Amino acid sequence: MTDSWGSIYQEEVRVVFHDGSALDGHLHLLSRVNYPPGPETPLEMLNRPDAFFALTGAQGGPVLIAKAQAEVVSCRQGSVPTDPERLSAARFVPIDVVMVSGVELRGQSVLELPPGRTRTLDFVNAPGQFFGLWSGDVTHFVNKSLVRLIRPLD
């Protein structure tokens, strides 16, 4: 889809804010990125250094959302994304996440870390403002700065 935002595609999401309010809409993602090839993922977009991201809200107009205020961005993605070339480096870790708002999430994250740095603590301290948590057919993109605590379940 090409519109005033440039060449984008949209992903249906729900954004939950740290005060408990929520907004449903369509996330604006780039149709092409340099690496990895293919369309941008929600996690890649959320971890860009931009302070805001665009969403088309229920009224049809664009809404610009401050990443710092978005506690969790959720969408329907049933499978954990894995790059076949990096699958041997991936480690699947079940975790419980309790957010500042009291929302609790349980699922698994994919850790790709260098040897000797494979603890869950190393993963959550890695670069990036958000991390992915896969739970059934829903993927939650969790804002690290709004996490109260994480319990590794392995």
Image (spheres, rainbow, N blue to C red):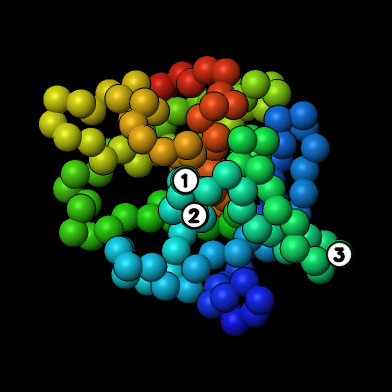
Q: Give the residue at mark 1.
A: 49
Say whether residue 28 is left or right of residue 107: right
Separation of residues labelled 1 and 3 (CA atoms): 27 Å
Q: Quadrant of the N terminus?
A: bottom right
Q: Amino acid at mark 3?
A: Gln
User: Which residue is painted at 53% across and 48% down in the image?
Assistant: 50
Say which label, 2 or 3, has the lower sequence index.
2
**In the image, farthest residue toward the left:** 115
User: Which residue is painted at 57% across and 18% down in the image?
Assistant: 148
Res. 118 image quadrant? top left
* Callout 2 crowding tier (Cα within 10 Å): few <14, some 14–19, many ≥20: some
Per the image, label 2 sits on a secondary structure element best described as helix
Q: Is residue 113 above or below residue 151?
A: below
Q: Give the residue at mark 2.
A: 45
Q: Give the residue at mark 3.
A: 59
Res. 113 image quadrant? top left
